[in-house]
Image (spheres, grey):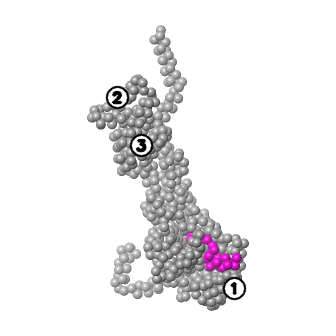
């Protein structure tokens, strides 16, 4: 009877476990042997306007510990049995190892102490095997392995294919269960030292739950992060007690959807060339900073943008702030395009209007305004060409403060351009109520204002475009992986700033800058008429003020002057040179010329003065000409 009763109770319990409590135990089994793996989508690529690859994803792996599985007795015994077999030279099975620890319970050890002892031995084995492979001190890896008892621990990231295969063999050979090589992706940049500030960088998403999940943090990587991210997939993996995947029992699977590609307006050929010229300038002048931007004035597309110092896209070491859009400076005389453009627009002057420059010293309103040369009477266009400060103030003074500030705003200063980049500064266009006569004169010649390089070149675009403001853009299109365009930049229509006639007067004045008596002749190059403006501003050091002998010099221009197809700006902050005057025309001008000469060849811009190119060829000696022809032939020109 007792036996029958006992068997009946056992049968009842069996029925209860298999039928009534089936769901509960099924979930426990799944928690132990079924793992949901996230399938990372491939991040979209970044391309230049011609399709050249600028960024793509590269397959990498993370070495991950499943904290639940490494605490499993069966998983631990597999590895420890393998270790003991190798150490003693005698075969030891996982079952025998397990029985050894089960006997420990019968002689008085608790289940908890047995599990802790077993886990400690297993973690020690993992440390012994993997520390040399990962090239980390054993004490550091031991600390990491014990850092959590739930969830996952990432032991290593960015493991590439070759090392992945080696590690997988080591895990299999040593029967290290509960440790997986999870497939993922990381960003790869074919040219990690080019276009760095525009590209931006990736970083791990905030929050402990997002370990190993990356997103754009700055630049294009951040602005178009959502478009390039794609949609993650998943799959359920079932493993046996030896932690091997059971392929026949794979559960639900959702494939990831790759992100979209972003095509920029950047021309990488031009970008690389201007960065090479910048490096030469850094070597020659040792400036604190140098920035250049090149744009198509007709549509506002940025073709090249770079600054030094910069950073390495791979290591992220260096200066990551994009000076072209984030940093402000006092532009000096390049800002004079506002006063002259406004005065021409209002009909207050024409290019030939006489302006008395007070022989280099103006002292009639309680402040002193000096010129770098004692000029008497100059025409408006020559006052502009010679960059007379007194002439600029006389022109601005005829506008009055309110009207002058209005034009400053209309040229785009004091507000963001809206370009598709992060951390853009609006600059400063202070209220008229804060002005006095002295600050009014300062603003007329480009002091007491704060502008970004992008604002300055975009303002010049007003003149190149016949008086219309064209907002800049760096986005050509967002495309699917198959190349279908799904988004283009929202191009705003040009807004009228000055009249067509005023713009033509400005072009005429800017061409005078490049002629005899102008300040920009060293920025010229053969074959092209250039409209330009130089700028030389004393450097204002925070906490010190304006420092004698230190300058921010610049040169900006467009060409061909009467049919503008390209415009550029070069800004050199605090250059150092011996035997050369530290002016925009003498420092930044030649850099502009070198970049311009390279640009017209790369972009195929037709010269408007071809006779100058013929004259240049005629001046070459036969040997130099032969070498040039050989080089052109080799290049396929």
Which secondary structure lies at badge 2?
helix
Q: Which residues are the magenta region?
A: 436-456
- Using the numbered discs, state the Cα–Cα distance from disc 2 to disc 3 in whole angstroms: 27 Å
Q: Residue sitting at 33 percent across and 36 percent down?
A: 82
Residue identified by numbered label 1: 364
Give the answer, above or below, for where 2 lies relative to 113: above
- Using the numbered discs, state the Cα–Cα distance from disc 1 to disc 2 in whole angstroms: 104 Å
Q: Is residue 164 left or right of residue 311?
A: left
Q: Residue sitting at 46 percent across and 80 percent down?
A: 578
Query: Tag on residue 142?
Result: 3
Observer-side mark, 2 or 3, equals: 3
564 or 397: nearer the eye?
A: 397
Sequence-first disc among 1 and 2: 2
Say if the magenta span includes residue 389. no
Residue identified by numbered label 2: 96
Q: Residue sitting at 47 percent across and 8 percent down?
A: 1
Sequence-first disc among 2 and 3: 2
Q: Are marks 1 and 2 in contact (CB under 8 Å)?
A: no
């Amino acid at each position: 009877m007792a036996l029958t009763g006992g068997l009946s109770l056992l049968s009842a319990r069996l029925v209860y476990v298999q039928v009534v409590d089936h769901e509960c135990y099924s979930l426990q089994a799944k928690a132990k042997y079924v793992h949901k793996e996230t399938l990372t989508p491939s991040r979209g690529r970044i391309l230049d306007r011609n399709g050249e690859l600028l960024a793509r994803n590269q397959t990498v792996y993370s070495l991950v510990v499943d904290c639940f599985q490494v605490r499993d007795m069966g998983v631990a015994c597999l590895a420890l049995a393998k270790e003991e077999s190798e150490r003693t030279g005698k075969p030891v099975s996982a079952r025998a190892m397990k029985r050894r620890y089960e006997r420990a319970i019968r002689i008085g050890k608790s289940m908890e102490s047995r599990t802790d002892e077993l886990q400690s031995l297993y973690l020690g084995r993992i440390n012994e095997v993997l520390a040399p492979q990962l090239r980390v001190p054993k004490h550091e890896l031991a600390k990491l392995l014990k850092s959590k008892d739930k969830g996952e621990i990432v032991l290593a990231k960015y493991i590439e294919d070759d090392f992945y295969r080696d590690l997988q063999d080591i895990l299999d050979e040593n029967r290290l269960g509960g440790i997986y090589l999870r497939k993922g992706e990381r960003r790869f940049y074919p040219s990690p030292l080019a276009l760095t500030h525009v590209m931006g960088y990736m970083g791990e998403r905030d929050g402990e739950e997002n370990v190993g999940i990356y997103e754009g943090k700055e630049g294009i990587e951040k602005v178009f992060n959502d478009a390039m991210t794609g949609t993650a997939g998943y799959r359920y993996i079932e493993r046996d007690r030896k932690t091997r995947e059971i392929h026949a029992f794979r559960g639900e699977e959702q494939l990831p959807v790759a992100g979209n590609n972003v095509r920029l307006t950047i021309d990488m050929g031009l970008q690389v060339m201007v960065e090479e010229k910048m490096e030469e300038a850094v070597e020659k002048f040792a400036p604190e900073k140098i920035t250049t931007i090149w744009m198509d004035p007709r549509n506002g597309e940025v073709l090249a943008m770079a600054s030094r110092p910069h950073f390495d896209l791979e290591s992220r070491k260096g200066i990551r702030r994009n000076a072209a859009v984030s940093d402000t400076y006092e532009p000096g005389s390049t800002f004079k395009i506002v006063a002259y453009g406004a005065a021409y627009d209002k009909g207050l002057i024409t290019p030939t209007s006489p302006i008395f420059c007070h022989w280099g010293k103006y002292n009639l309103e309680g402040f002193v305004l000096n010129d770098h040369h004692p000029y008497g009477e100059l025409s408006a266009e020559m006052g502009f060409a010679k960059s007379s400060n007194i002439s600029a103030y006389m022109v601005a003074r005829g506008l009055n403060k309110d009207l002058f500030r209005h034009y400053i705003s209309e040229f785009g200063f004091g507000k963001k351009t809206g370009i598709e980049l992060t951390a853009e500064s609006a600059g400063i266009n202070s209220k008229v109520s804060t002005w006095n006569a002295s600050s009014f004169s300062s603003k007329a010649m480009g002091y007491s204002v704060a502008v970004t390089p992008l604002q300055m070149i975009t303002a010049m675009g007003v003149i190149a475009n016949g008086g219309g403001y064209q907002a800049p853009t760096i986005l050509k299109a967002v495309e699917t992986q198959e190349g279908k365009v799904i988004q283009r930049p929202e191009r705003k229509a040009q807004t009228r700033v000055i009249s067509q006639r005023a713009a033509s007067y400005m072009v005429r004045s800017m061409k005078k800058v490049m002629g005899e008596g102008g300040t920009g002749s060293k920025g010229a190059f053969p074959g092209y008429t250039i409209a330009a403006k130089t700028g030389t501003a004393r450097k204002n050091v925070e906490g010190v003020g304006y420092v004698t002998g230190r300058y921010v010099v610049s040169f900006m221009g467009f060409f061909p002057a009467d049919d503008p197809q390209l415009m550029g700006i070069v800004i050199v902050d605090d250059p150092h040179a011996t035997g050369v005057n530290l002016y925009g025309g003498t420092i930044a001008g030649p850099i502009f010329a070198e970049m311009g000469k390279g640009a017209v060849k790369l972009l195929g811009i037709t010269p408007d003065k071809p006779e100058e190119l013929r004259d240049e060829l005629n001046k070459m000696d036969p040997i130099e000409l032969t070498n040039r022809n050989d080089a052109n032939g080799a290049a396929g020109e």
